Image (cartoon, coloured by chain):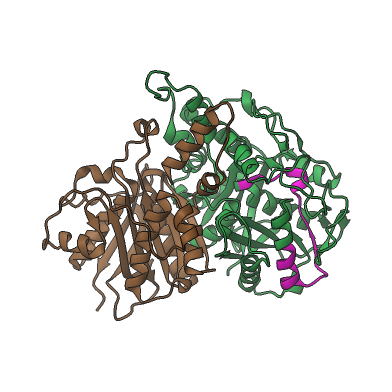
Chain colours: A green, B brown
Amino acid sequence: MQPLTLTAMTTANPLGLGLAATWDGLRHDRHGLRPNDFEDATIKTWIGRIDGLETEPITGALAEFDCRNNRLALAGLRQDEFERAVDRARETYGPDRIGVLVGTTTSGILETEIAYRQRRPSDGALPETFRYRQTQNLFSVSAVVRRYLRLTGPATSISTACSSSAKVFASASRWIEAGLCDAVVAGGVDSLCFMTLYGFASLGLLSDGACRPCDTNRNGLSIGEASGFVLLERQRYGTGDLMLLGYGESSDAYHMSTPHPEGRGAVAAMERALDRAGIKPTDIDYVNLHGTGTQANDRAEDQAIRRTFGENTPCSSTKGGTGHTLGAAGITEAIIAGLCLRHGFMPGILHTKQVDPLFQSRILLKSEASPLRRVMSNSFGFGGNNCSLVFGKAP
Amino acid sequence: MQVCIQSVGLVGPGLDGWACARSIFAGQDLYRLKPTPQLIPDILASTERRRSSDVARLAIAAAQEALRSSGLAGDQVATVFTSSDGDGRITDQICAALARLEREISPTSFHNSVHNAPAGYWSIATGSQLASTNVCAYDLSFAAGLLEAAAQTIVEHQPVMLIASDLPFPVPLHAFRPVEHSFAAAILMTPSAAKTSLMRWDIGFEPSRPATSYPEELPRSLYSNPAARCLPLLATLARGKTETVSLDYLDDDRSLVISCEPVV
């Protein structure tokens, strides 16, 4: 594929609001997790909650979109001079030549959950103030981003569970390659809600403390929330130090909520990403794992990594710092991968004490400084939906 | 973006397969309103038949028909699923459970709640490890899916099946999203023409023009279903003549314009 330049990026995640805070958190082994204090949810687990979303409604022209998820989306866009980069792209290409692709899994379903608690006793009707289209529908986050940034190119939400905002890179690349767009704002937003907390609890997949990816005693994930965006442009037009070099998409074709035990689909996604980038496994200096902290996920990914890379490529998961931000995990970790490239840094896994002795890939528990040229980021989701991305430093 | 249409699958109210819809659009048969057939596709193994949600069965029924007619194997075809609302019954079940004191969610409902659940069941049924994506653009989800599927067909140079499906929400959500009938359609496209190609479509994202009107043979109430917005295009496919179809895509000033012509 034609490499694309990341001419701007921004992230709001439990580790930090903005690139500088996120980098500072990574560099100093900080984490953004805490015992569950989301609304009145009683599940005993740890979460990555972003403070202040409860008290900062969307006002003005976009007020109809107000909900936790869209608040988080706009909070993300307002950081890291992202809007300025979009302004410049809008002037260069025109608003109709810039696409919007946002990954999300639950969008503003929290509003529906709250509305169901307020049903009219006589007939079960939801309150009249409920707005389905602007909150729960998966497109609402793409609609609000597109309106806020005043873009009129193609737009869609992508929802493939926990790979959603990795998949936006694949679609963005295709849209530019097919000539539909000159630039794409690609991102992901997912926010805390009751459905994911109680749903993952029903599957026995929530950690009782802060998640411990790849640990012998790992016992589940820690749900987090995040928003993140990148501006992607063709290499010859964009100016920036980071590039998307490849993407690989695959399906496990195995089970709805359990990965293939040998990571069959994960291997296919990684190999396709390497193929598209036109590189060999040994060209990858570091892999940011999906690494959720569940028994089955981490074991399958370790198998897949060993089959693809052997035992020498350094790998780690940064979900101990951010939590698993579900539909925003792909973009959050793509941006973390970018920070790692920019600063020559491989983060260790937080909270993990002892790597599972059955694992054969080279798992980093301690952070290391090391010049990096190319890194891979993995995202795998329910339904067996996998996406691997390759990023590199601009020559 | 030029793609060739190889086959179609379709399930809707009074519409039991593409042959049925085609003969109605071609004026050979009269339409009769009947409930959407409740199909349990036989491509699903028994476990998945039991566990799958309504929207997964509906989407897979259409996909299975299109795949059969194409002569291709399931593991040769990448997929793009599009739906505005996913499975409203699952949303309703989960939100109702969360409003109760004990807040107990069924694990099966939870994994069925992901937008890509139909894609997951489809990949298990076909054994396909190829790429699969899921898009949503509210009422304009079909147009968004068509754009994504066509881009994937020409850029990746491989067969891609687009599967659009939506179904009515139960009460109380129905009041806020009044979709009346279940409907799904699958369209299998390839980058170049084959002997069996039904038509060539040239798809462009263009300044707005009035949308092509919905086929009058079918009831207006069907078009409250976002997936049914594919029907002006499918009617053109049934007639097989050179025509241009315009679909609304996004709320401001853009349309998808599809120039349809027979493959010669």
> Residue A143's x, y, as percent?
47, 41
Task: Tell me where residue A257 sits by quadrant.
Answer: bottom right
Residue A309, above or below B165: below
Check if residue A324 falls in the magenta segment: yes
Check if residue A78 falls in the magenta segment: no
In the rendered structure, the answer to whether residue B71 lies left or right of residue A394 reads left
Residue B241, above or below A327: below
Residue under the point 17% across and 60% down = B25
Give the residues drawn in magenta, as a range.
Answer: A301-326
Q: Quadrant of the N terminus of chain A?
A: bottom right
Viewer-nearest residue: B219 or A72: B219
Viewer-nearest residue: A297 or B232: A297
Residue B190, above or below A131: below
Residue under the point 45% across and 36% down = B92
> Residue A207's x, y, as percent?
74, 43
Task: Tell me where residue A202 sits by quadrant.
Answer: top right
Residue B8, above or below B85: below
Residue under the point 57% across and 51% down = A161
